[in-house]
Amino acid sequence: MIHPFLRRIAAGPLLADGAMGTMLYSRGVSFERCFEELNVAEPTLVQQVHREYLAAGAELIETNTFGGNRYHLALHGCGDRVRELNLRAVKLAREAREIAGEPAFVAGAVGPIGRALAPFGDVTLEAARDAFREQIEALLEGGADLIILETFSRLDELLAALAAARAAGDLPIVAQVTIDEDGRTLDGQGMGEVARALEGAGASVVGVNCGVGPQGALAAVEATSTATRLPISAMPNAGLPQRFGGRFVYFTTPTYFGDYAGRLVAAGARIVGGCCGTTPAHIAAMRAALRESLPVAAPVAPTRIEVVSPEPPAEKVSAPPTHLARLFAERKFVVSVELDPPRGINPGKMLAGAKALKEAGADVFNVADSPMARVRMSCLAAARLTMEATGLEAIIHFTTRDRNLMALQSELIGAHATGIRNVLALTGDPPRLGDYPSATGVWDVDSIGLIKILKGLNEGKDWAGTSIGRAASFFVGAAVNPTAEDVETELDRFRQKLDAGADFVMSQPLYDMDTLRRFLDRVGSLRVPLLLGIMPVQSYRHAEFLHNEVPGITLPAELLERMRRAGERGIAEGLAQAREFLFEAKAEARGLISGTYLMPSFGRYEVVGELVRAIKES
């Protein structure tokens, strides 16, 4: 049987109410006060807000329970009153509907728990889900017609709340995120990704609220409509607040809201309403603007939902593989290019080079971690900037040189939270090579230990075995130097990296087939993808420097002589040699080499761009 709420929105757009907090604040309630406690302390005040929204034409009113979970209530000394305050809130809304005599739905409002979740805080998603379920069961017991999950800035927290609602009972669920001006959630999800995830998790309606004003909400509705067939909701703020006379004031007018109500519905919104800063005047203006498109609603029968108990076991959430992992799985020849983070705070040159390389056909970028122990912008910041500027993934080079066990794990968890999941585990060049020879290296673990740390995080545990909540999904790379002087030690460490769980391998720059053949013969069958390192030589002087002064790089005598004879044609000659070697290696070691890792010298991204184009056109 189709639920009355779902049948109603199938018939045409539905108008919801506006802000509760704004109305209470305007009547003298301090923001420091527990709004949910007002359901018992000042019920007439709360119910009057409901009645005003119903009088303005709202067909859906939300209970005064946005922060009605145990964690938020505990901040006000009410953590043990979850059931009482939520039950009372539903009762007030239902009574307001009966007094008004208007057909309207009562939505049990559920917001985020109000505490930082793991890995940033001490509350796991499982604990948050328990808190959501406790609140939602009370809302259902009180007779809410539906549940509305709103103002979630993190998709994983919203999915936990949605799972709790689905486990508590069978009723419609409106699931809404809050986004920034760029149309993304705090954890970087676009509305298309959000809609698909929520639809797959069982939401009845998906949408956006708070965060942005009508224009931002309109863009969100348009983006959502292309990603899901579910009904869409939009409940924007009344613009951005300003502090005026010691109070926060929203200046977006009801007339403006009324105008956008029609645009939101035309773009595909099935539920429209307001959030922070909106008042009954805004809802009345929206009602007037939508007068011709709102169907006549039938009386709403009170809803009673049986609470399901006990709760089923929590499902393990597995993140999709990274784009790099998918390329390897599809046996595509991967082209990765290294970017040098700037020495200062201006990333302009790096980002311009990244954009040009993307146009040339690069699949992914490598972002170095202060190579040669010279101070540069953090690889995490540089990678995030590059990903945002190009839309391509980055592989961060992450060393154990500068970070102890605590810093290693905290930065990796932070990287994962910002969408950086491809990590090349490195020990790092010693500080004496760089700008600060008196600096000390840390090295609580080496690159092998770092791989183990990353794999532990993928199991949901830190180095000490303590749970981090949800398991990470890093795609872990290891480095190998086929030209190492002590080949036996290098190969032994390489095998240890593979045994520790490395998912792919990247080699130091190579320049001739003989060296590559010897390496592949010694290693035998590689069980993970290999990216062949290529660094085009720029001149004979550059070749001499690489061969004699840079650890881990050896150039064959034939190439040195070839560059000496090239003279002023050094760049062209070096590029030609790199192309010849790469194409020969690609043909001879087909199936063993999964791609290439190109390293521009001196920031000459345009030189490597030519090689990228040649690879993609072959």
Image (cartoon, helix red, strand yellow):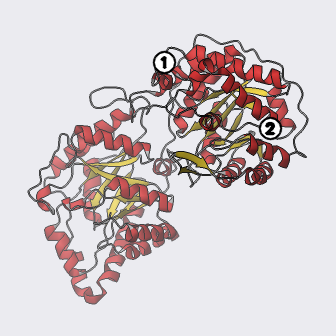
Quarter of the picture holding the N terminus: top right
Quote the CA–CA distance across marks 1 and 2.
34 Å
Q: Judge depth for marks 1 and 2 and give the one in front.
A: 2
Callout 2 crowding tier (Cα within 10 Å): few <14, some 14–19, many ≥20: many
Q: N-terminal of the two: label 1 or label 2?
A: 2
Image height check: is 482 above or below 598? above
Q: Nearer the viewer, residue 114 or 458?
A: 114
Image height check: is 205 above or below 323? above
- Locate residue 420, reporting x and y percent: 42, 48
Q: Is residue 322 left or right of residue 405?
A: right
Query: Looking at numbered disc 2 in the image, what kind of residue is underneath it?
Result: Ala
Whether residue 395 is visible? yes
Q: Quadrant of residue 610?
A: bottom left
Callout 1 crowding tier (Cα within 10 Å): few <14, some 14–19, many ≥20: some
Whether residue 594 is visible? no
Question: Which mark identifies residue 79?
Answer: 1
Q: Residue furthest left?
A: 438
**Tag 1 secondary structure:** loop
User: For the image shown, how many numbered marks are present on the structure?
Assistant: 2
Q: Are marks 1 and 2 in contact (CB under 8 Å)?
A: no
Q: Is residue 415 left or right of residue 373?
A: right
- Locate residue 326, reporting x and y percent: 50, 48
Measuring 40% from the left and 42% from the top, which residue is drawn there? 474
- Locate residue 190, reporting x and y percent: 58, 49
Image height check: is 558 above or below 69? below
Residue position for label 2: 56
Q: Nearer the viewer, residue 279 or 530?
A: 279
Measuring 67% from the left and 50% from the top, which residue is drawn there? 217
Image height check: is 260 above or below 320? below
Q: Is residue 544 left or right of residue 572?
A: left
**Tag 2 secondary structure:** helix
Query: Looking at numbered disc 1 in the image, what kind of residue is underneath it?
Result: Gly
